């Protein structure tokens, strides 16, 4: 079998032909993900063989999550901490950051990660790495992988709790940093008083030694959703009517997991019998 073909006065190996086909398919894939700028296309082609670290995977997942839910998974400070730990050369980092840097010039993937983190801070990072649909299950699995590798907990348990509660109990999350409540849920059809009820979500993380939360009395929420994630990354949740919580004049209410049963069968449209 011939190991190439003769084309227009030039011998082209099958390796070159296959590489050209692969690069074209890769370009088409990137364009389908919304990356059409030629500069970004060339950068991603040059970095195609780089191994993606867990932190870089989370960075790109956070951009994708923001596109869908208008909220990021982790703050810039979390990723900046990992960049600082790399002890990168300031001059080379400045060169990689500059618009004049050529993608053909070799730099360690760590420098490109540092650049992506700065783009993330400015809201200019274009999601390029492929990730599966980001459900609460994916987030929980990712948090477990991160803990196994770094022996530290990710700062995303609050987001996992909100995502889980929204998925399980059937309510819509409010935009990030919204005041007063975390979500809005339709009331059962039998209740004609209001179209929806406001939900406040609190998460008991694996770090807590006792299963309780504190919640502000302020706010117009009517139902409290408590999500518990234990040290084995098992997750469960409860819905509690505000009217059942302890009355008082304190600014905060302390709610222990074991003191309340869940009212989700009554409150959640996900559990209503049609």
Image (spheres, rainbow, N blue to C red):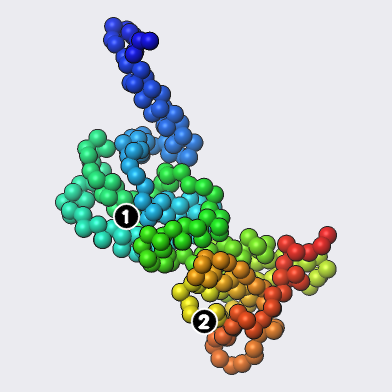
Nearer the observer: mark 2 or 1; the answer is: 2
Q: Earlier in the sequence, mark 2 or mark 1?
A: 1
**Label 2 Cα crowd, 10 Å radius (few <14 / some 14-19 / many 20+):** few
Q: Nearer the viewer, residue 83 or 119?
A: 83
* Residue 80 image position (x, y, % from top left): 31, 61
Left or right: residue 92 versus residue 62 is left
Q: Nearer the viewer, residue 233 or 167?
A: 233
Above or below, 22 relative to 267? above
In whole angstroms, how far apart are the C-alphas of marks 2 and 1?
Answer: 38 Å
Considering the image in quadrants, where does the C terminus appear? bottom right
Residue placed under numbered mark 1 in the picture: 118
Q: Residue at x 33, y 8 (%)?
A: 6
* Residue 2 image position (x, y, % from top left): 35, 10
Give the number of the disc on residue 5.
none
Q: Residue at x 52, y 81 (%)?
A: 210
Give the number of the disc on residue 210.
2
* Residue 207 image position (x, y, % from top left): 46, 74
Left or right: residue 185 versus residue 255 is right
Considering the image in quadrants, where does the N terminus appear? top left
Above or below, 90 relative to 216? above
**Label 1 Cα crowd, 10 Å radius (few <14 / some 14-19 / many 20+):** some
Q: Nearer the viewer, residue 149 or 136?
A: 149
Q: How many marks?
A: 2
SS at mark 1 in the image: helix
* Residue 140 image position (x, y, % from top left): 51, 60
Left or right: residue 230 versus residue 261 is left
Q: Residue at x 32, y 16 (%)?
A: 13
SS at mark 2 in the image: loop
Is residue 178 at least partly visible in the picture? no
Identify the image quadrant of residue 171.
Answer: bottom right
The reply to whether dot 2 and dot 1 touch (C-beta < 8 Å) is no
Q: Residue at x 49, y 70 (%)?
A: 231
């Amino acid at each position: 079998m011939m190991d190439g073909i003769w084309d227009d006065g030039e011998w082209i190996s099958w390796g070159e032909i296959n590489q050209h086909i692969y690069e074209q398919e890769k370009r088409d894939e990137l364009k389908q993900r919304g990356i059409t700028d030629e500069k970004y296309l060339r950068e991603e082609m040059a970095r195609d063989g780089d191994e993606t670290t867990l932190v870089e995977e989370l960075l790109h997942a956070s951009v994708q999550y923001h596109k869908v839910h208008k909220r990021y998974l982790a703050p810039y400070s979390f990723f900046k901490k990992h960049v600082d730990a790399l002890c990168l050369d300031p001059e080379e980092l400045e060169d990689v950051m500059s618009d004049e840097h050529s993608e053909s010039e070799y730099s360690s993937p760590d420098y490109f990660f540092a650049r992506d983190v700065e783009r993330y801070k400015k809201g200019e990072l274009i999601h390029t790495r492929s990730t599966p649909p980001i459900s609460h299950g994916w987030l929980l699995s990712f948090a477990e992988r991160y803990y196994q590798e770094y022996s530290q907990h990710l700062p995303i348990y609050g987001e996992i709790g909100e995502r889980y509660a929204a998925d399980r109990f059937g309510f819509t999350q409010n935009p990030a940093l919204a005041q007063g409540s975390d979500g809005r849920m339709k009331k059962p059809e039998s209740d004609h008083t209001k179209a929806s009820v406001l939900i406040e979500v609190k998460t008991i993380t694996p770090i807590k030694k006792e299963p309780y939360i504190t919640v502000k009395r302020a706010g117009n929420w009517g139902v409290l959703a408590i999500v518990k994630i234990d040290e084995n990354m098992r997750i469960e949740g409860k819905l509690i009517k505000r009217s059942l919580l302890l009355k008082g004049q304190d600014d905060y209410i302390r709610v222990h997991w074991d003191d309340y049963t869940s009212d989700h069968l009554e409150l959640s449209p996900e559990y209503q019998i049609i």
